[in-house]
Structure formats: structure tokens, C-alpha cells
Amino acid sequence: MCSATANTANLLRSLWRSGTIRELARAGLLPEFEPLRTGSAAFSLQTRVAPVLLAPAEWCGRLWQAAAGAVISLLGELYDRELTLASIRPEFVILGDACRPVYARPGAIVPATPGQVEFAIAQFAEGLLLPYFVSLARKSLTLRAVLSGDGVPGMAIAFPELAVAAREACAPSGGSIKARLRDLANVVAQPLQEPDTFWSRYEQGPQGTASMSSWPYKNQAVERILATTAPASVLDLASNSGWYAVLAAKMGARVVAVDRDETCVNRIFGSASEGALNIAPAIVDITRRSELHAPVPRERLTAQTRFASEFVLALAIVHHLILAPPRLDLDGIAGLLAGFTTKYLLTEFVSFDPESHNPYRPDVRPDCTPWYTLDHFLAALGRKFGAVVVVPGPAGRRLVLAEK
């Protein structure tokens, strides 16, 4: 929701009545809004579809790049209308339809006085261009630590040389504002180099999603279950390359795909953008705190609150969370996964049987031998879900479907 006080309500109302807000939405620079007739603000707009809210610490490099490009385009369109932005912060950019970043605070649109335009460009340098430069320099891990807080200094202090470079790129050059914005658009068009990682090389599914008859059993089973349950929203935990996220999006679901490997998340973002798919990719370790400031002061929205979906996919993840750090127990796993879903959970149990191809041996956690079994896993899920069934299939890794 975007509200305007008496000082800015007249302008926002005028932009709405003139059709400017809708024109910018059709251009893919703002989300679709509609007036909200409740509340104490003089004039309010709300998005037609509630967006998936990502904390800046959860952004991948490609999202920083796309967000910077989107805001540059918006600044150009506004300048043509003798307008600009009073505030540019990553929190004001959300993922709209088709994995497209859009600026979601139209109440920050103000007349384009020379001082206000320079102020907007300076904020762009700090809020969006600097994080993009950090991503280009492959320092994203430090960037996420800075953005998540915990007493870490701000971006300009943490990355002084890159901060100077961002300011210089945005400094007045003697040319027109439109020329400067075109130059900045070229700056953010530089391709990101994505290093290969262990998980980015991990094959999650067959190439493409068109020839179902040739898919392995697990992929076919997931497709059938999604087709039967027809969820409106899907959360793919530890999504890796995003094969299942893409599948769910092509089947009509609104998808959130999370992984802690940035190269994987970058690739999901690329697939979603190229395919115009409604996938919100985020860098998240689901066992760690990942929060976003809520509109209510001093309140934070957890990842479970923001990403909760009708259907959660948690494939090839349980054994990693139990047999490697953080070494959860079965009840801990069941509680963690249940917190993300409003109805269905499809997960996978990987035993120590040879057919399961478990990458861990029992001696990596000797204490788990008595309780790390499929029956105990089903019992733990049964304490959080109303119905738990093993999906019929060949020997080896077993799919488990749970319903609240």
C-alpha cells in the first residue's frame, strides 16, 4: 500500500486521475494500483496483487542489475513529465509480474526541480548502483551481511572504493539529464560473471519441461501431484537450478524459489525473466533468520510469513539438514517445513539404502541410526500435518506428501 499525507496527496491524486500512474504501470515501471478508500491518509493506493516481499539481503546480483535498470527507466519517463522521485531505496522496489522489478512507492513522485533530480540520482548511486557494483566485484556475501544488519557498517563504509565509483558514475557531467540516464543504463548493462559452484552444477531435472514421457519418475510424480492439487502458490525450498519452480510457474502457480547459492538464484532469475514467469527468486538459508522491516514500526516479517504458500516443495533437502550442519532432528525438520506451507508439503526421504544414493554415510552422525528412518520421519510429519502419505514409486528416495 502507498499512502500520501496532505502535503503530497494532491499530486498523487492528480497523477492517478490523469492516468499517469496507470501509464507507468502499463510500461512495466510501476505495479498495477487501485485506490484504497480506508485509512487516515488523504489519498492511498494499493497494489492489485499482493507482491512477494523480498528483503534486500535476499536479492541476487541479477535482481540488483534489473532493479537498477528499471529505476533508471522510471526516472527517464518521469523526467519527460517534469517529475522525479523523492526517495530511492531497494525496499521500494518489488518484483511484479513476469519477474520484473517495479518501483512500488508512487507517493514519492515529486516535481522535477533541479535540486530534486540531483538528489534522486545521488540516492540511486547509493541505494541501487553501489550494490550492483558490489555484485560485479563478486562481494555479494559481504553485501548480504551488511544489508542484514547485525551491527555491520553501511554499504558506503563497507565498500568505500565502490561507493566512490558509484558516485562518480552518477555525478553531473555537463550533459542533459536524459543523456546521463542513458549513460547510467549502459553502466548497469554490464554482464555479471557467475562462478560455477558445486550446487550450480547439480542436475535437478531433465533439460526443458516439454517432454514429460522422458522424465525420470520423481519429475513425473511432482508434475502429477501439482496437476492434481492445482495450488495457486508454490514455494520451492532449496530450488537449485529452479527446474521445479519453472514447472510450477508454467502450470499457473505463483512461485517463490529460494536457495542459499547465489549462482543458482541468478540462474533462476534469468530463466524467469526470459520466460516471463511469475517466479520470485531469493537467496535464503531457511535455517537462519531472514527478516524484512514491516510497515508497522519495530515489527519484522519473517521469511516464513512472507513466503508462506499453499504448496511447498522440499525435495532433496531433508538429509542435508539432518546429516550435515545444522543437524536438525526429525521434529525440527517437520516444524520448519510446516511453517512455510498453508496446506501441502511434498518432501523426500533419503535413506541409507544403496538405492537412495545418499551422499552421507551413517557414521557422519552416529546418534541418528536408531531414528533416521522413513517411519520415524512420517511420524514426525504426522505431528504437524493431518494426513501424511508415501507417494508410490520405485525403491530408493521416497516422496512424501503431507496435508494440513
Image: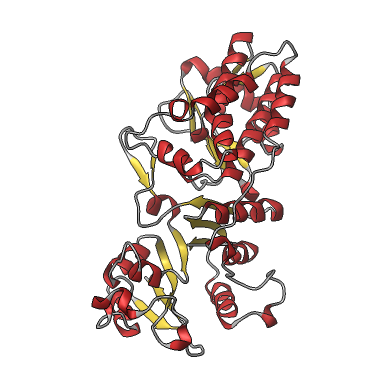
Position of 371 relative to 343 (above/below): below
Q: Which of 374/81 is in front?
A: 374
Which residue appears at 69% of the width and 16% of the height? Answer: 82
Q: Which of 250/203 is in front?
A: 203
Q: Does residue 214 appear in the picture of this structure?
A: yes
**What colour-coding does the image apply?**
secondary structure
Which residue appears at 65% of the width and 50% of the height? Answer: 98
Which residue appears at 49% of the width and 57% of the height? Answer: 259
Position of 205 relative to 241 (above/below): below
In the image, residue 159 lies at what x, y percent? Answer: 48, 29
**Side of 79 where 121 appears, left or right:** left
Q: Does residue 36 appear in the picture of this structure?
A: no
Q: Which of 252/215 is in front?
A: 215
Residue 31, located in which quarter of the rendered image? top right
Please state, as top left, top right, bottom left or bottom right, where the C terminus lies in the image. Answer: bottom left
In the current view of this chain or complex, which residue is farthest to the bottom? Answer: 395
In the image, residue 324 lies at what x, y percent? Answer: 35, 67
In the image, residue 202 lies at what x, y percent? Answer: 56, 67
Position of 171 relative to 246 (above/below): above
Counting every numbered tag in the picture gives 0
**Side of 12 where 351 appears, left or right:** left
